[in-house]
Amino acid sequence: MKTPYRAVALKPAPACLNPREFLWGTDNNRKGINVKLIIAAIKPFKLEEVREALTAIGVRGMMVTEIKGFGSQSGHTEIYRGAEYAVNFVPKVKLEIVVAAAMADQVVETIQTTAKTDKIGDGKIFVLDVNSAVRVRTGETNDDAL
C-alpha cells in the first residue's frame, strides 16, 4: 500500500539573525528613524520653569500628566488637624517629549539642570528609542512628524 505522503528535500535554513535583529529588524531597515522618547518625572512646582527652558532650546511640544509615585523618597508623613498621616505616594508630574536623536542629550541636560533642587525626590529621566512616529493630520513619518 502506498503512503499518501511524499518525501521532500528541505533546503538548509539561511544563516540566522541574532534574536534582536529577528524581532526588530536590522539597523539597515531602521534607516531614517532617529527619534527618541524622553520621559521625565519631576516635582510639580518645577513644571513651568522646565517648560520655559525646553521651549527656549527649541522643543515644540510635550505631553504632561499628573502622577503619584515613590522611589528612594518612600513617601513622607504630614500632620493634619493634629493627627499624623503617612503619605505613601508623592505627587509628581510626568513629561513625555519626542525629539530628534541629535537633540536628546540637550533636552535631558536642560531638564536635569532646570528641575534640580538638590533635595531627595527631584525625579528621574528615561530615554527610549522610538520605532516610528506619524503625524495624524498629514501622514508625515518619523523625523518629519515632529
Image (spheres, rainbow, N blue to C red):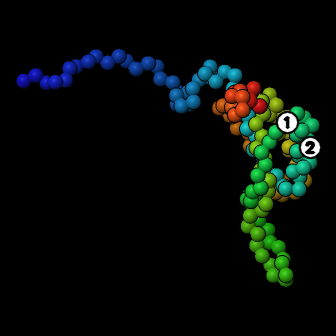
Q: Position of residue 11 (x, y in %)?
A: 35, 16
- Determine whether 14 is above or below 99 in the image: above
* 7 with respect to 32 (left or right): left
- Can residue 125 be seen at all in this image of the molecule? no
Q: Label 2: how many residues lie within 10 Å, few (<14), some (14-19) or many (20+)?
A: few
Residue at 89% in and 38% down: 55
Q: How many marks?
A: 2
Q: Quadrant of the N terminus?
A: top left
Amino acid on which disc 1 is placed: Val
User: Which disc is residue 85 wearing?
Assistant: none
In the image, taking residue 11 as reference, residue 42 lies left or right, namely: right
Given the image, on which type of amino acid does mark 2 rest?
Answer: Glu
Say which label, 2 or 1, has the lower sequence index: 2
Q: Badge 1: how crowded within 10 Å, few (<14), some, or many (20+)? A: some
Above or below, 63 against 14 in this view is below
Q: Residue furthest bottom?
A: 82
For image coordinates 69% across by 34% down, the residue present is 136
Observer able to see residue 75: yes
For the point 72% across and 28% down, which residue is it? Answer: 138
Q: Which residue is mark 1?
A: 59
Q: At numbered mark 2, what does the secondary structure look like: helix, strand or loop? A: helix
Q: Quadrant of the C terminus?
A: top right
Residue reaching furthest to the front: 137
Say which residue label 2 marks: 52
Residue 8 lies left or right of residue 120; in this view the side is: left
Residue drawn at the location 85% of the way across and 36% of the way down? 59
Distance in Å between CA atoms under marks 2 and 1: 10 Å
Q: Residue furthest left?
A: 1
* Residue 9 pos. (x, y %): 28, 16
Q: Looking at the picture, how far across and down is residue 100, in whole percent? A: 77, 30
Q: Secondary structure at mark 1?
A: loop
Q: Are marks 2 and 1 in contact (CB under 8 Å)?
A: no
